[in-house]
Every structure is written in C-alpha cells, then in structure tokens.
Image (spheres, rainbow, N blue to C red):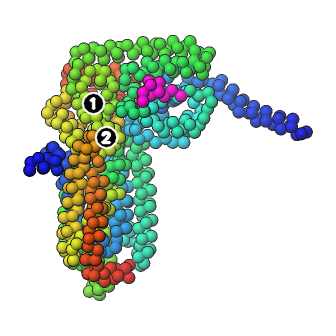
Amino acid sequence: MTELLSIVFAPGFFTSEPVRTAAVIGAAAAIVSGVVGVFTVIRGQSFAGHSLADVSSAGGAAAFLLGINPLLGFLGMSVLAATSMELVRVDRASERDLVTGIVTGAGLGLAALLFYLDVTTSSTTGATVTVMFGSMFAIPASIVPLALIVGIGALAAVGMLYRPLLLCSLDPDLAAVQGVPVRLIGLLHLIVVALAVALAAITVGAVLSTGLLIGPAAIALHLARRPGLAVLTAAAIGVAATWGGILIAYDSYEWTGGHGWPVSFCIVALIFVAYVVIAQARPTRVRPVLGTARTGVASAG
Amino acid sequence: MKQLPVITALMILFAAGPLGIVAAEAAGPVKAIGVENEYADVISQIGGKFVKVEAIVSDPNTDPHSFEASPKIAKQFAAADLIVKNGVGYDEWADKIIAAAARPKRKVIDVQQLLGLPDSTPNPHLWYDPKTMPAVAKAVGDALAEVDPAHAADFHANADKFIASLEPWNAAIAAFKAKHNKTPIAATEPVANYLLEAMGFDILTPFSLQKAIMDGNDPAPQDVTTQNNLFTGGKVKAFAYNQQVTSALTKSFLDLAKKNGIPVVGVYETMPTPGYTYQSWMLAEVAALDKAVTEKVSTETLQKGH
C-alpha cells in the first residue's frame, strides 16, 4: 500500500512548500472559477470570460513593470475591462460579441506594449510566460493572503447575488418583470467573473484561465440537474483537476529527467479530457432543464 | 549596337558609385561592435584610438536573454567592420541582423565558434570562463590587423598586453582554489558557473533549476525544495545571485539566503558600468567571492554608487 502511494505521490510531495502554495492558491482559484463559471456558461458569456482573461494579462505585465503584487495587476485590469464591456450598451448578442472582441484586441495590444517595456527597462525574466501561462510552483507564498481575501469576497458576492443572478441568467424577461435590476446584476456578475479570472490568471496564467472558468462549469452542467448542485460540482471538479494537475506535474519530474511538465498544461489537459468523456457519456442530461432558459437569454441578448 | 558604349559607361558609373562610398568610409576609424559590453571593452582595449567601439547589450537593469533589437541597432550593424558576439543562442537575434545587412569585408567573431564549442553547450555565459578572453583578444587583434593593416603592430601588441593583464585574475583564481577547493555554493542561474568551477566551487544548485530560471520557465518543485534546503540547512558558504535574471522565485531565494546568514555575491550578464574594465570586473568578482567565503560578507552589487 505504501509502495503504491509512493508511486502515485513522488517523494516529497506533501512536504514541498511550492506544492503547498500552489495547492492553496490553485484550490481558491478553482472554487471561485467553478462557482462563477456555472453562471457564465448559463448566460452564454464564455467569450466574455475569456476576453477578461486576455485583457487581464496587460495588468499582469503592468504589475511586473511597477514591481507590485501581480494579483493586483490582474485584478485591476480585469475589473476595468469588465466594467467597460458592460457599460457599453448593446442590444444584440452579435454586437456584444463584437464589443468583447474589440476590447480583447486592445487589451492584448496593451499587454504587448507593457511586456516590451518590461524586458527593455527592467530585469523581468520569464514575465511573458508567467503572465500568459502561469508558473504555479514559483508563486511567492506572500500572495496567499490576498488571494484568499479575493476568493472569499467573490464567493460572498455570488452568495448575496445568488437568487437574482440565477433568475436573470435563466429568464431575464421574467426577472425584469419581477423588478430585478437586470443590467446591474449583469455588471456585478461580470465583476465577479473578473475576480475569478484574476485568481485563475495568477495560477494557470491569463490565457489558460478560461479553461478553469468554463471547463469545470460545463462538465458540472452535464452532470447536475439543479443549478445549486451544478455550482458545487463545478467547484469540486475544478479543485480535483487543479490538484490532479499539480500532482502530475510534480510526478513528471521523475519521467522527464528532472525537467517536469508545466502545471498549467496538466490542469487544462485534465479538464479537457474530463469534458470530452462526460459530454460523450451524458450528452442530454442538462439540456431539457436549461433549454428554455438558453433561448430566453439569446432573445434578450 | 551603337548604344553599347553608352550602356557600358552607365554601368561603370553605377559600379563606381558604391566603390567611391566604400573608399570614403575606409578612410575613417575602424568601426567595431561588441554585442555584449564585455566584448566591446576588450575590443576597445586592443583597438585603442584607431577603433570606434560600440556596445549593444549593456543595460545592467535588464536581462540580455530577452533582449529586443531595434531598427537603430540594425543600422549600427550595417556600418560595422568588426562584430564580436557571444553565440550559443545567447544573441541569436544578432545573427539575423548580420545576415540581413551583408557587408563583404566585415569580420564577425562568434566566440562560440572561436572556442570550438557545440550548439548544445548548456551554459552560454562564456565570458566568465578564464579561457575565453585570451582567445577573443588574439582573434580581435588579428581581425583588426586585417581591416586596418597600417596599425597591425599596435593591435597585436595591445592584444598581447591584454592577455598579460589577465594574469592577476588567474593568480587570484588559483590562490582561492588552493585554499578553498570544493567550497559548496548555490546559484540562481549559470551565469558565473565557469568562473565558480575554475575557482573550485562545488555548485550545489541543480542545473535544471538554473536552466529554468535562465529561460524563464516553470521550475520543478523538487528543485525549488532542494535549493531552499541549501539555505535553511546552511549547506552552502555563499550564494551567487544573478542581478540581471530576476523573478519572484530568485527574490524568494535571496530572502531565504539572507535570513539564514548565507553571504550573497552579485554576478552579472553584462559588465557593470561605469567604472570597470573586463579585468577589474573579474578581479572584483573573485574578491567578492573570497570575502563571502572567508569573512561571511555579502557583496550584493558591484555597481558603483549603490
């Protein structure tokens, strides 16, 4: 039994400080992303979520330039992008995609400039890889408190918004009739997405944070019928994929001759495989329940 | 056929134009580029007043591994008679610029090729190797003598003088090795490894970690733990800290080293400026390492005014 355990968990896994920091921050990011991701998927805002992640990379690059906590950079930029995307009043879904795309392009362009300034004015080795694809085992432990505060804040916000947000997401017309401030809820939701994306960006990187936001939520919506259960399932799947990815990356040291595979790849690969398997095995579970809501969202834009 | 003489005349005129420019240029001082400023320093010591030398990579606050070339640099390269570059992928961008701006009589010294090193050489920081600069100095002297034969004797004499001036450094290395062979040391990145090895240091940091830091890749957590234990367990006598390849990870090592009383020695990708020549820089590094091992005193930076 112990032999089997030592094969699964390579020596030193449980005592390694980089692993511990990665596991804590990764779990916080996965829980928040999973919970927020369920609403994002129901609302059909996956692209907006990805866009916030891309734009947040400019914040990560700026943090290197200013020498501040990178999480603050990601947060600032993604919240700014979320607010500006939601404040541009658009009525058609196609136009919303257009605005999202244009903001994404501008944000990534800004990131390119800031990365250039990073390498030409200061010693910021690996800034681009760290911001875009994450370096979980190099996260300084000093980021943990801020990450936990952001995570708890995001979950508290979702808790307070839960009922109106769910109603707006499933049937915005009914929500409006009942006097729910649909636009305000939409803005608050996107800001919470921005918090989730910033947390995910610090772990798996800005570009890959979509994987953590959308993947576990999509899998959960295949498995669970009730939204409340889907939220819990998504969080659990996210944490499982993150910890599984950390373990695979840690163990990969043994079979790659001491190089090791990037954690971000391992996490996103696990999520992808899980989605393909679940979508094949249970293709129709969730559609009847959310089917009406989806068309409702589409018509309301 | 009547037009033939006219065409010939035109052709001669066109051909003569560029020749005239070349002739005019050759009259000025020889223009040389040391891609990294340590090579530029060697060229200027050998070329003296007959050579105008420019260094491309010299900012002590940036990481040369992620250098971004600009159009201005392409122009400098196009005008140069002699270019000295490191090679081993360290300044690959320079190969492209050199190839794009062809110049028939230009000399290019690639230090990697000069030393006969394969492309797979794991540590590109050749200038810290005591064997490197004597070979570079000789090659620079020969190249300058070919470009400007009128001053060949000066260039050869200066090259010999430069090689002789490395003697105190070599003596300091040998003296340290005789007294402190196999002293355990940690590093962030392989920049000074050739010097550390010549001094007899035992570098305990896993090379895979040094390479991950150099390339800005994900470090393996096992390696991070190994490195942390070197500091917390007091297993090393000094910590060679690359001041130009820094990240959150290298800073966490720096904090840990200080917390555990491990003396820190700043090492560099490019020659710290102002106030150093290649020789005085290398001597200062050996002196700082010696001070760390014998007196437990840190020399975090060699930059003057810090």
The answer to whether any part of residue A80 appears in the image is no
Query: Marks 1 and 2: CB-CB under 8 Å?
Result: no
The answer to whether any part of residue A131 appears in the image is yes
- Look at the image and tell me in which quarter the C terminus of chain B lies: top left
**What mark, if any, has residue A55 been given in the picture?**
none
Disc 1 to disc 2, C-alpha distance: 16 Å
| Residue sticking out furthest to the left | A1
Amino acid at the residue labelled 1: Ala
Q: Nearer the viewer, residue B120 or B256?
A: B120
Total numbered labels placed on residues in the image: 2
**What mark, if any, has residue B212 been given in the picture?**
2
Q: Answer whether residue B215 is magenta in the image.
A: no
Residue for point 51% across, 36% down: B95
**As displayed, is residue B55 above or below residue B280?**
below
The residue identified by callout 1 is: B240
Q: Label 2's element?
A: helix
Residue for point 44% across, 25% down: B116
- Answer with mark 1 or mark 2, whichever residue precedes in sequence: 2
Counting from the top left corner in percent of width and height, residue B257 is at 20, 34
Where does the magenta region start and end? Answer: B108-118
Counting from the top left corner in percent of width and height, residue B304 is at 35, 28
* Nearer the camera: disc 1 or disc 2: 2
Amino acid at the residue labelled 2: Ala
**As displayed, is residue B156 above or below residue B105?**
above
Left or right for A24, reference A105: left
